[in-house]
Image (cartoon, rainbow, N blue to C red):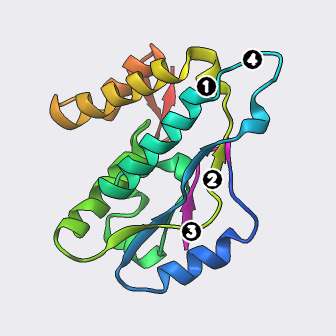
Amino acid sequence: LLLFLHADCKLPDGFDAKVRALLADSRTLATAFKFAVDRATIDPAVGAPVLPFSVMERTVRWRSTWLQLPFGDQALAIRRDRFAALGGFDDLAEVPMLEDFLLVHRLRVLGVAGLGRIVEVPGEGARCDARRWLKASVWRVNLTNQRVMLLFSYFGYTPADIFQLYYGTKVHAAAGSAQRA
């Protein structure tokens, strides 16, 4: 079992048993948790409105359930053998970002072929730190993320191009893996 999770996210207690049970079904390509913003990471002194976070949680749930597009902030879990069959770390380790997007795209191809689905883990979701949305606003961060997905999916941008756009710096390969300049 492999679990891919953004570093600023936390999983609920007992998550592993739920994930293992779901992955025991051969038609489960992978699992993902509901997305949730960790309200405990919002400083009450900041006075951030709750509505944008609630809207974002609902739209992410729609995207991941109906479009089968969950990402690393939802804790993607996959059986090791399936991950290896999809190419494993060989090429994903070489991209500077979007590795979760690339993995989900491969899983969606299997889903379209009728070989299974990405299944949502029932119960409490993965809770993500609110800092990135507090720093640049929920709307700005989500607009940037949508732009990234569109540029990559439909306009031929590479993960290195996206990295430069997102971080404002070029990617340099060092010791076989991409790093910021």
Q: Amino acid at mark 4?
A: Gly
Q: What is the CA distance from the residue labelled 3 to the residue labelled 2? A: 11 Å
For label 4, the crowd category at 10 Å Cα-Cα, with few meaning under 14, some 14 to 19 and many 20 or more, is few
Against 107, residue 29 (above or below) is below
The part of the image, by quadrant, that contains residue 51 is top right
Q: What is the CA distance from the residue labelled 3 to the residue labelled 4? A: 31 Å
Q: Nearer the viewer, residue 57 or 18?
A: 57
Q: Amino acid at mark 2?
A: Ala
The part of the image, by quadrant, that contains residue 173 is top left
User: Mark 3, mark 1: which one is toward the viewer?
Assistant: 3
Q: Where is residue 84 drawn, in percent x and y?
A: 39, 71
Kindly give the residue lying farthest to the front in the view shown.
51
Query: Which mark, residue 122?
Result: 3
* Residue for point 66% across, 31% down: 130
Q: Amino acid at mark 1?
A: Arg
Q: Is residue 45 left or right of residue 28?
A: right
Query: Which mark, residue 126?
Result: 2
Question: Mark 3 or 1 closer to N-term?
Answer: 3
Q: Is 58 contained in the magenta span? A: no
* Residue for point 65% across, 22% down: 49
Q: Where is residue 142 drawn, in percent x and y?
A: 44, 27
Magenta range: 1-9
Question: Mark 2 or 4 closer to N-term?
Answer: 4
As helix, strand or loop, the secondary structure at mark 4 comes to: loop
Q: Is residue 109 left or right of residue 87?
A: left
Query: Which mark, residue 132?
Result: 1
Query: Which mark, residue 106?
Result: none
As helix, strand or loop, the secondary structure at mark 2 comes to: strand
Contact between marks 2 and 1 (CB within 8 A): the answer is: no
Name the quarter where the N terminus is drawn.
bottom right
